Amino acid sequence: EAGVVQSPRYKIIEKKQPVAFWCNPISGHNTLYWYLQNLGQGPELLIRYENEEAVDDSQLPKDRFSAERLKGVDSTLKIQPAELGDSAVYLCASSLGTGESDEQFFGPGTRLTVL
Amino acid sequence: AQSVTQLDSQVPVFEEAPVELRCNYSSSVSVYLFWYVQYPNQGLQLLLKYLSGSTLVKGINGFEAEFNKSQTSFHLRKPSVHISDTAEYFCAVTRNTGGFKTIFGAGTRLFVKA
């Protein structure tokens, strides 16, 4: 069974440029998460989808960040414009159900460097 | 609100020695507890989880953790570590009522020396 796929794995951009990250969750997983992981910290939730509905986007900085999950499968996270402080690893995860006890399966992440 | 504190940022240990990685949490409601491991350049993967029942939980790779409600702790243990256990370990809590949000600790880097 293929795991969660993310691309690109690494991205280097200059500040004020736009950037997009793509995630393909495990087939059949209804819930998809985007997390931000700063160096030396644990993941912090940005947005959670149940199928195509964003059910928790309270931590997503909506002035520059946007996300979509078309058809309830793949998802894209966009930053426009990027700032120096956005340098971090962006993790995508998915889970089969929508419950709090469900195991989350994580992708390898996209490491973003903003110069 | 929930919070998770991993008391050690780094734990160096010799191969075949026992290890304990400490995790304390706070929450006003009941929670589920998880330990995830992150190997270099890989995503997090679940080691074990506590939902209910027996407070001693066994996971993959010989790890186990004990839920202590009175001390609000969920420490991870392994009786004999291997070089391959070198990784970052994250404790996480999810409240089981009143909305879904997983909070991760800052992580503990386990470094196993030969």
Image (cartoon, coloured by chain):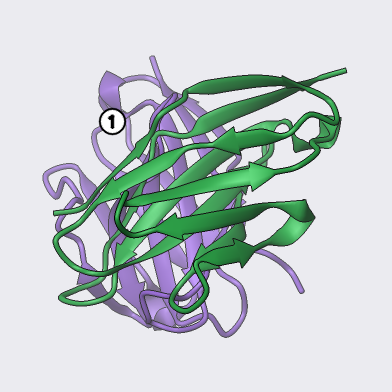
Chain colours: A purple, B green
Residue found at the very far front of the displayed protein:
B70
Q: Is residue B47 left or right of residue B7?
A: right
Structural crowding at the residue carrying mark 1, measured as other residues with C-alpha within 10 Å and reported as few (<14), some (14–19) or many (≥20)? many
Q: Position of residue A5 (x, y in %)?
A: 62, 58
Q: Position of residue A20 (x, y in %)?
A: 41, 46
Q: Residue at x 47, y 37 (%)?
A: B22
The quadrant in which residue A17 appears is top left
Q: Is residue B47 left or right of residue A62?
A: right
Label 1: element kind: loop
Q: Residue at x 36, y 74 (%)?
A: A100
Give the residue at mark 1: A82
Q: Residue at x 79, y 36 (%)?
A: B81
Which chain does the residue under circle 1 lie in?
Answer: A
Could one spot residue B69 in this view of the protein? yes
The quadrant in which residue B64 appears is bottom right
In this orientation, which residue lies closer to the viewer: B7 or A76? B7
